[in-house]
Structures are given as C-alpha cells and as structure tokens.
Image: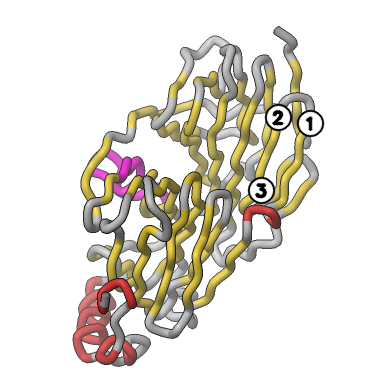
Amino acid sequence: MVDTEVSDNIVEVPRPVVRRFQARPQREGVGAVVRRSIGRFELKYFDPFLFLDEFSVSAPGGFPDHPHRGFETVTYMLQGAITHEDFAGHKGTINAGDLQWMTAGRGIVHSEMPATQGVQKGLQLWINLSSKHKMVEPRYQEVQSKDVVEAEKNGVKVRVIAGEALGKKSPVYTRTPTLYLDFTLKQGANLQQPIPKSWNAFVYVLEGEGIFGNSRSSPVTAHHLLLLGPGDGLVAWNKSTKPLRFILVGGEPLGEPLVQLGPFVMNTQEEIDQTLEDFDNCVNGFERVKFWKSEAMID
C-alpha cells in the first residue's frame, strides 16, 4: 500500500469528528426511500443546512407536484435520471453525475419524477437562504456531468460541485457561501482539504470506508454522516483495499431565526402564516398554482 497525500494548503488544525450517526431508510414522496441525515429528529438543522437526503426511487413513484419557498435545493444524481418540471415552464432531465442547483426564493411548485426504468439514486441538499434572499426570484443552475469541474492527484479525485479544491473552482454561484465536494480516494490516499474556519461542515460517506479527523479514529462506512468540529480543514485517509467515496459540504452559518413548515422555510411564524396565505390564494409568487399541473400528474 502506497501512502500518498493531497492538499491545496496544509491543514494545521484538523477538524475533529464531533458527532457521527447512520442515516436510516424512511419513506418519502410517492414510493421513494430516503436516508435523511440532516433534518431528522437527532439533527433538525445544521446552519445553513436544512436537509440532506440520499434518495432511491423507481417509476411510477417519485416526488409529484409540491411547493418550496425560502431556500435552495441541490440535486446531485448518482444513478439513473430524474425529470424536473415547474409551474414557470422550466423542464429538464438530470442524469447520473449531473447537478441542479435550484433557488426556490419567493416560490416554486415543481415535480421530480423518474425519467428511466430501474432505480434512480441521488443526493438532495437543502440550503437555507438569509432573510434578504428569501424572496428573490427563482433561479436554476444546471450542470451536466461532463461540465462538472474535476481534478485528480496522487490517488485523490474530486468533483467540485461548489467552491474550490485541488486548485479547481466551480462556476456555480451560491447565495449562501457553500463548499460541496465529491471525493474519491484510492487505496492508501490521504487528503487535506481546507475549510473556512467560521463555517459549519460535514462529511457523508457514499462508498467504501474511511478514517476522518484523526488517523487513529475507527473507520466509517457508507450512509454515515460526520459533523466536523472547529479547525481549518478536513484530513481523511483510505486505509482499506477498496475506493472510498464521500461528499464534504461546508457552509457559512446564517445565524438567523428559523421557522420551518414542511417545504416553507422563513424567519418568523408571521412569515410562515403569510406564505400559507399566499399559496392558498395563488399570489405573491404562487400565481401559477391555480392553473398548473405537471405532465406526470396529468398523465
């Protein structure tokens, strides 16, 4: 086994793993199964992150017409394809390796349904927006797999979804400053990845097993979420015989009050009440609700 190390800058104070738990399957949507690690009873909110779901769904199941307000969703496909359609006429399909960064802002109603036969798998991350951005106009950033920025060095490969790693920077704009990296470490590889000191950060393991934060720590396997403590970066090792794949996500905390009612995320109860009124009356961003159904619902 060859021990190799990769870093943009030396991590002087490695972030320790301060909390670790396994994301267990639960039902969501129509016939879908998700492993929710953020947004469950043990971890309701990890500022600025609201939800992290690893989802698995097959037709005719999916996530039919539903609304959002006040945050962003990041959908990253691991297998298969999902077709997205919203009430503003935006429609598209994201395939394995593709990314959709959706700013719901003042309001979106959309559907997310399997585009092919078999099992579709992916990750969906919900990122809170600050009070000044909650009512912005909806926006999409969609990146095909071939256009996702990648770098590889000494047994470490990274796909830069947001932020920067190994000297490569993603073009994705994040209203809430965010780092989102998809790492694969070959046997024997050792990674050092800087993270802004003031940010919250976590690791979610997708495949294999790895050691994080301290070389003497016990290995962590797939479907585990690791919350990272204070420090200036992540250190990780793959001491197993198989590839290790995980995402590293970090974000600048908003430090604002949070009131959430399902798909609506605001700062006060009054704003949630207003959102419900807007949605029920089809106004203030939800005007198209009255006349729209997705093709999946019409079929």
Q: Which residue is mark 2?
A: 156
Marks 2 and 1 in Cβ contact (< 8 Å): yes
Instruction: Kindly report the distance in space between the C-alpha atoms of the residues bearing marks 2 and 1.
Output: 5 Å
* Residue 89, percent from left and from top: 45, 84
Q: Left or right: 58 with respect to 245?
A: left
Instruction: Kindly report the distance in space between the C-alpha atoms of the residues bearing marks 3 and 2.
Output: 13 Å
Q: Left or right: 269 with respect to 84?
A: left
- The secondary element bearing badge 3 is classed as strand
Question: From the viewer's perspective, is residue 29 above or below residue 208?
Answer: below
Residue that extends furthest to the front in the rendered view of this protein: 117
Q: Amino acid at mark 3?
A: Val
User: Observer-nearest residue: 91 or 268?
Assistant: 91
The image quarter containing residue 33 is top left
Question: From the viewer's perspective, is residue 109 above or below residue 258?
Answer: below
Identify which residue is drawn at 54% across, 44% down.
Answer: 249
Q: Which residue is mark 1?
A: 153
Identify which residue is drawn at 30% across, 55% down.
Answer: 59
- Check residue 256 in the rendering and tell me which mark sits there, or answer none: none
Q: Which residue is mark 3?
A: 160
The image quarter containing residue 185 is top right
Q: In this picture, which residue range is highlighted in magenta?
A: 34-47
Instruction: Kindly report the distance in space between the C-alpha atoms of the residues bearing marks 1 and 3.
Output: 14 Å
Marks 3 and 2 in Cβ contact (< 8 Å): no
Question: From the viewer's perspective, is residue 217 above or below residue 6?
Answer: above
* Residue 158, percent from left and from top: 67, 39
Q: Amino acid at mark 1?
A: Lys
Q: Amino acid at mark 2?
A: Val
User: Observer-nearest residue: 28 or 139?
Assistant: 28
Sequence-first disc among 1 and 3: 1
Identify which residue is drawn at 50% across, 20% down.
Answer: 209
Residue that extends furthest to the top in the rendered view of this protein: 1
- The secondary element bearing badge 2 is classed as strand
